[in-house]
Image (cartoon, helix red, strand yellow):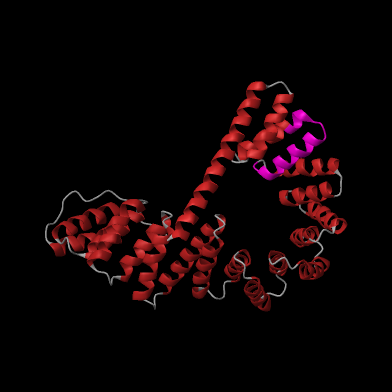
Amino acid sequence: MRFALLLCVPLLAWPQTIPELESSARASLAAKDANGALAAYQKLAQLVPNSAAYQDEIGFLLAATNRASEAIPYFQRATELDSKMAQAWYHLGAALVLKQQSDAGVHALQKAVQLAPGQATYREHLASAWESLGLTYQQKKQWVKARDAYRQALALKPKDDALRNSYGLALVNSGDTPGAIAEFRQILRRDPNNVQVQVNIGYAYIGAADYKDAIKHLSAVAAAHPESASAHYDLGVAYKQSDDLPHAKAELERTVQLDPKLAEAHYLLALAHVDSGEPDKAIQQLRAAVAQRQDYGDAWFELGTILKQQGDADGAIDALQHSVALDPSDAGAFNTLGLLLRRKGDLAGSEAAFAKAAALRDAEAKQKQRKLERGAARASK
């Protein structure tokens, strides 16, 4: 929701009666004088402290002047004074979502919709809030929560195919392949030429480790849409997971031709070259992967490992230093880095890397021990 109102110079003299103050507030609003209206409603709230309407108006005007954080307590006070005031709940929810307090915002918007189910604006904003919450959970890879949030949004916006696609992907990643495919097919009934959704059906088969059906489906999609990098990429994934390296490499090579910026395709192609005993080609693809994504920790680690095996100590050290900088919890990477630094004569750097590896392993061992002790304690009850 956008709060928008122009600012003007506030009035210099104030009437004192409630009707006069209300009249002044309305006049200020009509003139788009946010400061004048705000001052009037603040005075009214002092005279009538139990008025939910005045609290809501103050909150609205603060939010309209880009002060949503200040507005939230007024909206909260309004809902406390009148728990059935749908508008106050709506404003509260919108402000909370604006300040990225999505869970609380959704709760407030739900209250608004319950109190005023006929208000389309409230429903639309609630749907958007659920969708935003789903995306937040998706980015955190909390797929069950993402699924549930998207489902709530979809109940309010059943014709939104982009939202349904997000819901389908969340279903895949939360383990419901049949449910995901059903959602994707529902989109295709309305939009049969949606190539990405066609690819997502193959992705769902891959998620269920059903590589035979994934290859069958994605082969048809790639044949019908040879320009689709995502179709070739997912087909390459399915072949790689099936240990069909020649076909995997062919599909992934086609992918990087179509989309050279797809770092994941370069990385997976490198792994296929490793499995085929082609380290030089793997190094080439891994360098391409990290060139596209400097924060690609797995690619840096794999590159360091292969360069070490190929005798390029300097290159391996550089790659592993990138790797541990991106993932300081990888004890194995620190240990390998320590070995390489010791061979290069960098004893201080080597000892620091070994010490970090040892500390990480010690912390991991202690964590496992705590888990065992908690398990034993529960079993003894």
| Quadrant of the snapshot with the N terminus | bottom left
Decide if residue 227 is on the left or right side of residue 106.
right
In this view, the residue in front, 337 or 312, is 337
Where residue 175 appears, as percent x and y from the top left, is 62, 67
| Quadrant of the snapshot with the C terminus | bottom left
Q: Quadrant of residue 164?
A: bottom right
> What residue do we see at 49% from left, 51% from top?
373
Q: How many marks?
A: 0
Decide if residue 122 is on the left or right side of residue 26.
right
Query: Do we see residue 260 in this rendering?
Result: no
Where residue 51 appears, as percent x and y from the top left, is 20, 64
Where residue 296 appears, as percent x and y from the top left, is 67, 44
Task: Check the image and name the residue furthest to the left.
Answer: 17
What are the residue bounds of the magenta stretch? 295-316
In this view, the residue in front, 20 or 224, is 224
In this view, the residue in front, 312 or 294, is 312
Task: Check the image and name the residue furthest to the front.
Answer: 380
Query: Do we see residue 273 in this rendering?
Result: yes
Q: Is residue 303 magenta?
A: yes
> What residue do we see at 30% from left, 58% from top?
59
In this view, the residue in front, 306 or 35, is 306
**For residue 49, above or below residue 348:** below
Q: Is residue 309 magenta?
A: yes
**For residue 312, above or below residue 144:** above
> What residue do we see at 39% from left, 77% from top?
117
Q: Main secondary structure of the magenta part?
A: helix
> What residue do we see at 20% from left, 63% from top?
23
